[in-house]
Image: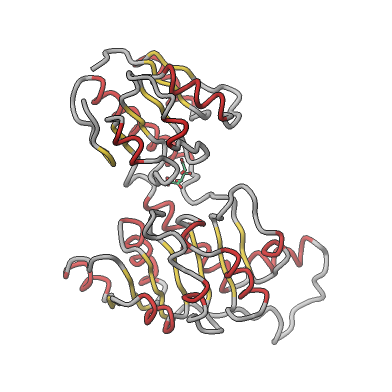
Amino acid sequence: PVKKPLVIVTRKLPEAIETRMMELFNTKLNPDDHPLSQAELIEAVKTADVLVPTVTDRIDGRILAHANPNLRLIANFGTGVDHIDLAAARQRGITVTNTPGVLTEDTADMTIALILATSRRLAEGERVIRTSEWGGWSPTWMLGRRIWGKRLGIIGMGRIGTAVARRARAFGMSIHYHNRNRVSEDIEHELEATYWESLDQMMARMDILSVNCPHTPATYHLLSARRLKLLQKHSILVNTARGEVIDENALTRMLVGGEIAGAGLDVFEHEPAVNPKLVALDNVVLLPHMGSATIEGRLDMGEKVIINIKTFADGHRPPDRVLEGLL
Ligand code: 8YV
């Protein structure tokens, strides 16, 4: 264990967090918040004892090949770790931690916001006013779909999926889910949730689908072109997880062809690029990866990162281990 490790933070974090990090560790910040280039990332792993990356840093095997032997901890600022090559980290005995729990409620809120925005055409309505095209009220104009009484299918019933289900119940939706494992009987009972072992069967029967699983090799394009075809014409799909879980080109084709009613997307396959064909559609709501973007959430995430580094530097196992390396 290194008492005052050299901690390199790849992006600008809330000031209070940066100040605490400067007090506790030998910290190198990124004050102008530019996304690190490949060369800068390589330089960082060459010198750091601890690296604090975010979702915008692709830490693959090529980058880690340059890591100095002192790099013992990657303390990710965020929950998803799909931008980090865990196999390569494991080979080098590097511990990887994340920030689970503190962004659950915010991301669940955003999921519900997207379900409502897409079903009730919020963004479209707003655009009508902003472009001064509103000709006045009419009984048959701007009709969305009610969410009350509808079937919500949640793909990935972890912390966030469960938090989405709790909210959705209050909106009068019935809860269905697909997950690697069934959740506990208590939770199923509380949510009156129906478990679908077959994702195909669930997809064919839902009104609204929400993606809440992590992106792993097993979930890459889980919503493939074939599976998306199972969705009903009136259904809507929302994604606050990772773009890679959905075959975005196939989804775009279906939206263009009117094969599903709409989509609400906070994440994309090739961020920050967004398919221009999606942008051209009125029945999609597009957000720039804002699911956990709250002032409070970012502070909580920062606190988690600090605790993980501090515990590790003190020679103990950090609480939020995704990958356990050598101490
Ligand atoms: C963050 C996220 O904005 O935690 C995650 O997995 O997607 C977001 O909450 C971002 O990833 C931080 O690195």
Where is 83 relative to 191, above or below?
A: above
**Residue 233 vs residue 105: left or right?**
right
In the image, what residue occupies the spot 67% across and 64% down?
Answer: 278
Report the residue that reaches farthest toward the bottom. Answer: 140
Q: How many marks?
A: 0
**Residue 315 vs residue 29: left or right?**
left
- Rendering coords of residue 172 (x, y %): 39, 77
Quadrant (top left/top right/bottom left/bottom right) for the N terminus: top left
Q: Nearer the viewer, residue 29 or 96?
A: 96
Where is 18 relative to 259, above or below?
A: above
Where on the image, by quarter, is ligand 1? top left
In the image, what residue occupies the spot 82% across and 69% down?
Answer: 133
- Rendering coords of residue 52 (x, y %): 42, 29
Q: Nearer the viewer, residue 196 or 119?
A: 196
- Rendering coords of residue 11 (x, y %): 52, 30
Quadrant (top left/top right/bottom left/bottom right) for the C terminus: top left
- Rendering coords of residue 289 (x, y %): 54, 50
In the image, what residue occupies the spot 50% across and 66% down?
Answer: 238
Q: Nearer the viewer, residue 280 or 303?
A: 280
In the image, what residue occupies the spot 65% across and 71% down?
Answer: 283
**Residue 205 vs residue 324: left or right?**
right
State the scheme by which the image is colored: secondary structure
